[in-house]
């Protein structure tokens, strides 16, 4: 099968289309004939050598796919050959065929193309797990999302709005801010021109927000605490500005703030399967009804994976970047 490989010892870890053996599913897996795969920042990190795949995972890049089941490992599986699914995977997505845990598969939503479906798993699993399972976001509470124009951001805006929350976002341009507002954000802050701490506190009459979803880290960490409400929760899911910061713990104590973080890729299939069940129960009907739609920035053929990575690294994209196989 064709798949993207990282050229060994190449400058900037160049990518190329190579030939690999077609994998075979274990008893708890299915083999998906991939039609489309999502591009995510962990893919860029793995390519750079700083985010290796967990033990047993495919070394091929790619954490989410959509396509048709070509083979099942267990005849008693809930899925059948020919079913159309999207899936969260631990690797292997940039390929013609990809293994997926049956527990981490979801049906392609009604009316969705494979390209749209491939934009769903990584963002929805991440957003649901953090906002609702870890963050315990309740209807009526307020949320600040950094990186409102990212795949995570555009998904969080729509899902939180559909479930009754007020949403504030940061983004790096006026155009991105406008598009976030169009998706349902109550306020969008251009972080290049405005101080998000000052703006959030002004918009909330000094109360701050109940929950913050942050992918930036670094110098954002202490600033987040300054606009987090009493009993507020900070959810750290990435550290694009670095993993070290200095905070005033007295501030955390006085406001009874909670700080937590998570990564999803290394969690076991049972944990991810529980999230899949919640998404199918609570979110899939919102997708079918058109209340939530994946925002697609751009689509590249599989052979142009390197150009897709350059698009993401340039931070000019809005929404998801997809590879079509």
Image: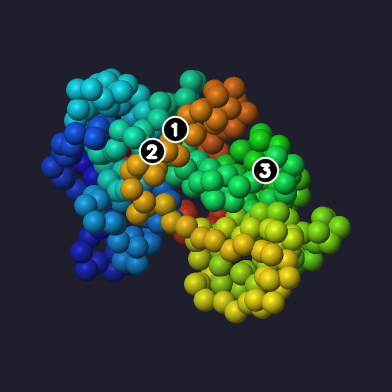
How many marks on residues? Answer: 3
- Find the residue positioned furthest to the left: 21
Residue 42 in view (yes/no): yes
Decide: marks 3, 2 in contact (CB < 8 A)? Answer: no
According to the picture, the residue beneath numbered tag 1 turns out to be 277
Furthest-right residue in this view: 205
Left or right of 151: which side holds 190?
right
Which of disc 3 and disc 1 is earlier in sequence?
A: 3
Residue that badge 3 annotates: 138
Q: Quadrant of residue 208?
A: bottom right
Q: Earlier in the sequence, mark 3 or mark 2?
A: 3
Q: Are marks 1 and 2 in contact (CB under 8 Å)?
A: yes
Using the numbered discs, state the Cα–Cα distance from disc 3 to disc 2 in whole angstroms. Answer: 23 Å
Crowding near pointer 1: few (<14 within 10 Å), some, many (20+)?
some
Q: Which of the labelled discs sits on residue 273, or is there none? A: 2
At 56% from the left edge and 72% from the top edge, which residue is drawn?
218
From the top left corner, tell me how far across and down residue 288 is, in percent: 54, 23
Q: Is residue 21 left or right of residue 132?
A: left
Residue at (62% x, 69% y) in the render: 220
Question: Residue 183, can we see it?
Answer: no
Confirm or deny contact between disc 1 and disc 3 (CB under 8 A). no
């Amino acid at each position: 099968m064709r798949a993207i490989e990282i050229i060994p010892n190449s400058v900037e870890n160049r990518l190329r289309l190579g030939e690999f053996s077609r994998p075979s599913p274990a008893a708890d897996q299915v083999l998906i004939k991939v039609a489309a795969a999502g591009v995510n920042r962990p893919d860029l990190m793995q390519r750079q050598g700083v985010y290796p795949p967990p033990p047993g995972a495919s070394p091929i890049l790619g954490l989410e796919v959509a396509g048709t089941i070509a083979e099942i490992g267990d005849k008693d599986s809930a899925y059948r050959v020919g079913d159309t699914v999207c899936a969260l995977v631990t690797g292997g997505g940039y390929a013609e065929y990809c293994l997926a845990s049956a527990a981490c598969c979801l049906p392609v939503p009604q009316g969705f193309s494979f390209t749209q479906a491939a934009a769903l798993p990584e963002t929805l699993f991440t957003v649901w797990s953090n906002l609702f399972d870890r963050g315990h976001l309740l209807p009526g509470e307020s949320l600040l999302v950094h990186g409102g124009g990212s795949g995570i951001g555009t998904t969080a805006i729509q899902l939180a709005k559909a479930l009754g929350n007020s949403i504030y976002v940061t983004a790096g341009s006026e155009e991105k801010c406008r598009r976030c507002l169009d998706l349902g954000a109550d306020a969008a802050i251009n972080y290049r021109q405005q101080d998000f701490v000052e703006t959030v506190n002004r918009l909330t009459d000094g109360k701050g927000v109940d929950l913050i979803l942050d992918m930036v880290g670094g110098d954002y960490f202490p600033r987040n605490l300054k606009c987090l409400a009493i009993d507020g929760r900070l959810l750290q899911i990435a550290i694009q500005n670095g993993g070290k910061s200095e905070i005033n713990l007295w501030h955390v104590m006085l406001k009874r703030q909670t700080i937590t973080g998570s990564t999803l890729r290394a969690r076991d299939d049972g944990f991810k399967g529980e999230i899949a069940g919640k998404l199918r129960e609570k979110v899939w009907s919102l997708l079918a009804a058109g209340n939530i739609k994946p925002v697609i920035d751009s689509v590249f053929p599989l052979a142009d994976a390197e150009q897709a990575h350059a698009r993401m690294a340039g931070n000019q994209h809005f929404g998801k970047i997809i590879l079509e196989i």
